[in-house]
Amino acid sequence: MPIYLYLDRRTFIHRLHPTVKILTIIGIFWSVYWVDNPVSLLPLGLLLLAGAQLTRAWPNFYSLRWLFILVIFATTVTWIIFYRQGKPLLHLGPLFVSRASLEYGLGRGIKLAELLATSVLFLSTTKVEEFAFGLAEMGVPYRVGFAITLAFRLVPLFIDSALTVVQAQSLRGYDFNRGGLITRVRRYVPVTVPVFMGALRKANNMAMALEARGFGYSARPTSYVHYEMRPFDFAMLLGVALLGAAYFLIYYTGYGAIAPR
């Protein structure tokens, strides 16, 4: 699995204004929030699949395929068990399965999968610098925006450090794949010590580097990167606004809810 999800493509979605990308992901999250019916969520899922095709982001989706499967399966099964509404199709002790629970569980699984897919698309088409610029254009304080984007920079570095430690231990003859599941998990415990030590060292070096560069001297520092709004950006904003309004209308009219049956 790649450490960084950004894919350098020459698509129109990559060239969107960073603020438009952030508002788009917010609009999709808004749309997903209002609807529980899996049938109503299907058009948005098809839209996300079209976005993955247009941006050629399938390598990232393939790398995270098991996460998508786990999210959908675990969420669906959990809500099927705990959503005890409607006429039961199967009722054995604590197990209660109805048509409403099946629809609700599947809808919840699809919702989380669509939120995850939206995030993957955003990270596949947006650089960290673009994300920071978009937050600043939206009026987010520079310190807050820097703290948010810092996570996108540091998490891949920590993962890379962990992989390096695992490879180094494997070269020294330490077998991580021997034994059962619990034994394998315990074998990874010693890896956490050098990873955390390396994380503390990198955090200290970053703090010194930021201080040396005058971080915090200005509330709104200048940037050599600048993006202009183009007609397609405004068209994209209009489309996202219509999408959010349509899904709120689906919720308001009751078509997005699960009716106990």
Image (cartoon, rainbow, N blue to C red):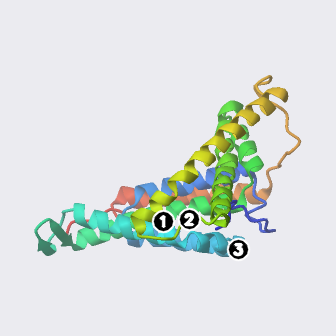
Circle 1 crowding by C-alpha within 10 Å: few under 14, some 14–19, many from 20: many
Separation (CA) of disc 2 from disc 3: 13 Å
Disc 1 is placed on an element classified as: helix
Q: Position of residue 75 (x, y in %)?
A: 36, 64
Separation (CA) of disc 2 from disc 1: 6 Å
Horizontal placement of 87 versus 43: left or right?
Answer: left
- Residue 187 to residue 65: above or below: above
Q: Position of residue 79 (x, y in %)?
A: 29, 63
What is the quadrant of the C terminus in the image? bottom left
Q: Report if residue 111 is visible in the image.
A: no
User: What amino acid type should be assigned to the residue bearing mark 1?
Assistant: Ala
Considering every residue shown, the one lying at the far left of the view is 93
Mark 2 touching mark 1, by CB under 8 A? yes
Residue under label 1: 113
Residue situated in front as seen by the camera: 188 or 203: 188
Residue under label 2: 117
Disc 3 is placed on an element classified as: loop
User: What amino acid type should be assigned to the residue bearing mark 3?
Assistant: Arg
Circle 2 crowding by C-alpha within 10 Å: few under 14, some 14–19, many from 20: many
Residue drawn at 57 percent across, 71 percent down: 47
- Residue 153 to residue 83: above or below: above
Q: Report if residue 87 is visible in the image.
A: yes
Residue situated in front as seen by the camera: 96 or 230: 96
Residue under label 3: 56
Q: Position of residue 125 (x, y in %)?
A: 71, 61
Considering every residue shown, the one lying at the far right of the view is 224
User: What amino acid type should be assigned to the residue bearing mark 2?
Assistant: Ala
- Closer to the chain start, of discs 3 and 1, is 3
